[in-house]
Amino acid sequence: MEEYLRRVYPGSAEDFFKKAQEAMLSGQKMFVVTANPEILMSAGKNEAARELLLCEETEIVPDGISVVKAMEMLGLPVTERITGVDLAEKLLHSAGRAGRSVYLLGAKEEVVSALAKKLRAHYPSMDLRYHNGYDGDKDSIMKEIALLSPDLVLVGLGVPAQDILLYRHLGQFKKGVLMGVGGSFDVLSGMKRRAPAFFQKTNTEWLYRILREPSRLKRFWRSNVKFLGEVRRAQKKSPS
Ligand code: UDP
């Protein structure tokens, strides 16, 4: 676990956004993984997840309070949570203002098309394309996206499938910020409500999600509780 957490960006959300924005606007390539306990735990069993987390090209940000806490427990430098949904929103805003090209892959058709409609209304000069996350072969869609070479590629298919898919096709991209965004399209389209400010400020967004969708409890238990157990074991082993 420590080998992945050592690679997580230690600075502020604003500084990371500026770095990603600079990459996007200057035609560089950047692959961003917003790390939550789920992807970190999946690396134990899934070779592709492990490889992408250790890849030099991958920028990892701490998406979740338990990742921040884990880094603190291991004495690693960390500033704050950097969420995929906030990063996605800011990058979309920046791409929209600069009239850049964007591809959204994922979520239900009604969700991703509602988000596209909203973005086109806000940013008429944005060159925007999208595809829902349920129809068609994902690898063929990724190949088409690579040919279009957009400045921003957001993939919302859930963790870790979205990150593994992006990583598999990374070599075909010459430029662009590529990022897995989980359920962000549901929130950014307005179809699903994000946790109110109170939950966001107190780092209890996870609690809000469980209260709204109790079926998430099992997933939460599987990833978060086991994750913190693993971090505790790493803490005991580390000399500091
Ligand atoms: N999704 C999809 N295709 C699938 C399975 C899931 O497009 O085959 C989408 C789903 O509609 C949702 C997102 O992937 O928008 C996953 O959301 P969730 O909140 O579970 O993700 P998290 O952010 O918790 O990883």
Image (tube, rainbow, N blue to C red):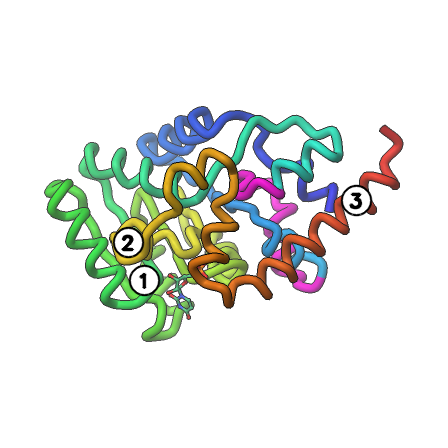
User: Which amino acid is tagged 1?
Assistant: Glu
Q: Tell me which residue sits at (51%, 50%) in the image.
A: 207
Could you tell me which secondary element the residue under label 1 belongs to?
A: helix
Residue 108's spot in the image, x, y percent? 30, 67
Q: Which residues are magenta?
A: 45-66
Q: CA distance from mark 2 to mark 1?
A: 6 Å
Residue 216's spot in the image, x, y percent? 52, 63
User: Which amino acid is tagged 2?
Assistant: Leu
Which residue is under mark 2?
A: 148
Q: Nearer the viewer, residue 142 or 70?
A: 70
Ligand 1 closer than 8 Å to label 1 CB? no
Quadrant of the rendered image holding ligand 1: bottom left
Residue 4 as seen in the image, left or right of residue 173: right
Which residue is under mark 1?
A: 144
Which residue is under mark 3?
A: 232
Give the mark nearer the N terminus: 3 vs 2. 2
Residue 13's spot in the image, x, y percent? 46, 30
Residue 16 as seen in the image, left or right of residue 221: left
Instruction: Tell us which disc is closer to us: 1 or 3.
Output: 3
Q: Nearer the viewer, residue 122 or 139?
A: 122
Residue 201's spot in the image, x, y percent? 46, 34
Q: Contact (CB < 8 A) between labels 2 and 1?
A: yes
Q: Is residue 238 magenta?
A: no
168 shown above or below 128: below
Categorize mark 2 by other alpha carbons within 10 Å: few (<14), some (14-19), many (20+): some
Picture quarter containing residue 4? top right
Q: How many marks?
A: 3
Categorize mark 1 by other alpha carbons within 10 Å: few (<14), some (14-19), many (20+): few
